Image (cartoon, helix red, strand yellow):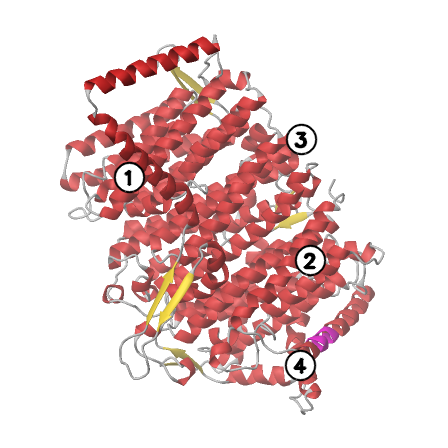
Amino acid sequence: MTGDLLVQFLAQGAQMTFVLLIAPLAVGVVRRVKARLMRRQGPPLLQGYFDLAKLLRKESVIAESASWLFRSAPYLIFALTWVAAALVPSFASGLMFNWAADVVALVALLGAARALLALAGMDVGTSFGGIGSSREMMIATLAEPAMMLIVLTLAIAAGTTRLAGVADFFLAEPFAVRVSLALSLVALVIVALAENARIPVDNPVTHLELTMVHEAMVLEYSGRHLALIEAASHLKLVLYISLLICLFAPFGMAPASAGVTGWLIGLAAWTAKLLFGAALLGLWEVSIAKMRVFRLPDFVGIAFVFGFLAILLAFLTRGVFA
Amino acid sequence: MPELSASGAALGALAAAAVFATLVRGAALALVYPLCAVAALVLGAVDLRVLLTGTELTQQLPIGLPTIGLHLRLDSLSAFFGIVVNGGILAASVYGMGFDRAKELTRRVEPLFPLFAAAMNLVLLADDAYAFLFSWELMSLASWALVVARHTDPESRRAAHLYLVMAAIGTAALLFAFGGLAGPAGGYAFDTMRGHPPQPMVAAVVLAAALIGCGSKGGLVPLHAWLPLAHPAAPSHVSALMSGVMTKVAIYGFVRIAFDLLGPPAWWWALPPIILGALTAVLGLLYAVLDRDLKRVLAYSTIENVGVIFVALGLALAFRANGQHEAAAVAMAAALLHALNHSWFKSLLFLGAGAVLHATGRRDLDGLGGLIHRMPRTAAFFLVGALAASALPPLNGFVSEWLLFQAVIAAPALPQAALHFASPAIGAMLALAAALAAACFVRVYGTAFLGRPRSAEAAQAHDVPLAQQIAMGGLAFLCVLGGLLGSVLATALAPVLGDLVGGGLPRAGSGPTVFSLVAFDPARSVYDAPVIALFVAIASLTTLVVVHRLSARRTRRGPAWDCGFPDPSPATQYTASSFAQPLRRVYGTAVFAAQETVVMPPPGDSQPARFSVVLVDHVWRALYAAPGRAVLGLSKRLNALQFLSIRRYLVLMFAALVILLAIAAVTT
């Protein structure tokens, strides 16, 4: 971070912009794959962009009982998610932000965005907002400890809580199947499904009232506010897929010392992996049904147990920190 | 030593304020609060100076017990906790300046407030067991009298009764602890104790006694039962002091005994505080998410935070016992910073609850709602406190939580298998506690401040006087500032860490920027709150500008959508109870044996359906109710002894004599 500060800064800015721009496409891929597997035509791949543009053009109808919190929350939620997404190393591990917050802070940033969304859900004072918020927070109390266990496991393995450090560690490490990492992978996938309100935890396309979680919270939003909430949830999906890539399949990522060529290779690899991950998510979603809300503790509980087993194994096979 | 004289003068001013307030009545009582604020400022300034310059002040006065005298000492640890204590006192005093002089001042509260403040400061200054226990008791009794200030309320009386019993047990345990520390020679000055650390077995007993004594004051499970009753029963600014500050004095007591007086630790000392602390953290929040009383929820959250601090202290003990001073410093910094941060946000939340109580006369969450429209300032400050209490960045609660997680990750380096097995469980429980805290405070804020008013009182609420807003605003500012400048606070802790664990955090400036908080090593773990906050601010402002440029900026107010069927009755909103229902199903069935019963009238019947929930508090049943019943039963039986004839009393005395003689014969 000395001479080429400007390049660093530009690379970081490029990553932020790129993450933002590709997010609706990733969601489009998920929808498209799902539709094709159901033998439907499906929306165009770029539908996500069209939707956002449409929402931005529309007027925003705000409930009479809404407060300033309701109006300002979308901007903060979007910004928090965007910064969190920028903190996950995507195509290069040595970018500017990567030192600013570690993975514990990343989890907490997402927690802040979620808390604001849940508060916004309760602001208007409707029953649906409350149902969404309370369920979202219940799921979070199950998913967040699991997430924390996973990141602690990886941090113990890599000897650092900096995500870039973890990615560098796995890049340098010869490939080997480790039980604790395999358990972490399964747990992280479950957490990612829960956090992104995907099937079987929640259904992003449903509007059947009693099964909604995420959609119930944002029910009162419209126009530009809804566009921001939607964009934030797209970003969150990209963030989690990036996180899975960064931790479990970092190959192709440019190391800290790489130049522009390395970054371009990394960018191509990351984009391909991201879209592949989105396609896998589509495949998963058509092959499983949504669960009842009170079956969720069992499902997300699996993530918790796996995360716990993983960290226990990591603790017992210590030695990295010693 | 001019500093100690200044402290002494401030303590004298507090005592004078207490005496003055017992003599006057009416509006003159209001003078107590400015006096307390000035005294707290002076005391805090002395503490800050001692902490920053690293000096140590001692004083011996020929009062108190003969042959012991009165030892006073202000070292870095006392000074740090002094800042915690006096910050809370200052905020509560400023809040008190906003009281209505005609209606809200009574001689049951105002004389005791300065006494309570002075007692807490004295505990920190005490350098011998007698002075410590004396001021500890003074603190307990002053706060007890404040709890019972509204004695007409049977709930308050019950709370005060339980508090008195628990405080007595706690002080007895501390007496025992100091007895063990003093040893057979009976050196009651802390200096003498430091010079002669007790034998391992005695040390174990002292540690257990200190855990009981300080844990009961701080609300460590299973000694917590009095806290959620007593803290909310006091007037709100006193609740803020009890929850935000007095629990910290309890932590100070434990740190003083376990890290300073008890000599070099054994590794297994770490287990009781870690295990009890983790249990406390999770259980405290499970109580909190199910409770429906605003102030009681806050008190339960205090229990959780005390648990978190004890976990950090336990980890610090473990690392220190194994000579890992760097990790011990991280854990200790987490404990101390969390004590400081908690004192800020919990005082803020209790003052906010006091404002709500003042404005609406209610503290049941299901009777509030929509206060963000009618009390905008209080609502904004309370939001800061709620988010800080949920350990969310970039506020202060997250800084200490982050340090604690760093300490947990370092635990595999400990050589003991027991700690290996315990640490991942601790990490999981801390993460669960953090997630539950977010759920708890979303629930509190969402039902009390958001939505539509659920009662006429909530609909007609008004914001509180300026002084009270200043008190809350100042604390909210500290919560933000402490979150951004956590690294500066951590640097200021260096002398305390050096004294207690013989290590320190990496120097400020070793990270990427001046304000980076670094644990262990910049290559390992960095949290840079100002950079994160800056980027979140830039990102949200950019978004605001861009969205407003791109979008049609039309905004219309309309009725809520609510899937097409909005119901005008505020009763259709989610309440605190309904918000807790998923959590109650998931956690309550296992922990509290929660049972829901729904009684539906038959079709065509117009009677309302009934819903009821039964929760069982196992801790209360097993550890409080059962012994209480046993004592009562035993005393009923022994009661017969009071009605014997003289002949029988003589027989009893003779029998006792024979038994004693027999014992003497056998033992000699």
Residue at image point 68% right, 68% down: A241
**In the displayed structure, does residue B165 sit left or right of residue B333?**
left
Tell me the tag on residue B323.
3
Judged by depth in the image, the label closer to the viewer, 1 or 3, is 1
Judged by depth in the image, the label closer to the viewer, 4 or 3, is 4
Q: Mark 1 points at which residue?
A: B161
- Give the Cα separation between the discs numbered 4 and 1: 61 Å
Helix, strand or loop at disc 4? Answer: helix
Q: Residue B19 lies in what quarter of the image?
A: top left
Judged by depth in the image, the label closer to the viewer, 4 or 1, is 1
Q: Do the residues labelled 4 and 1 touch (CB within 8 Å)?
A: no
- Give the Cα separation between the discs numbered 2 and 4: 39 Å
In this rendering, the count of numbered labels is 4
**Which chain letter matches label 4?**
A
**Which chain letter matches label 3?**
B
Question: What amino acid is found at the position of numbered circle 2 in the picture?
Answer: Met
Span colored in magenta = A275-281
| Badge 4 and badge 1 in a common chain | no
- Along the polypeptide, which appears first: circle 1 or circle 3? 1
Tell me the tag on residue A96.
2
| Label 3 packing within 10 angstroms: few (<14), some (14-19), many (20+) | some
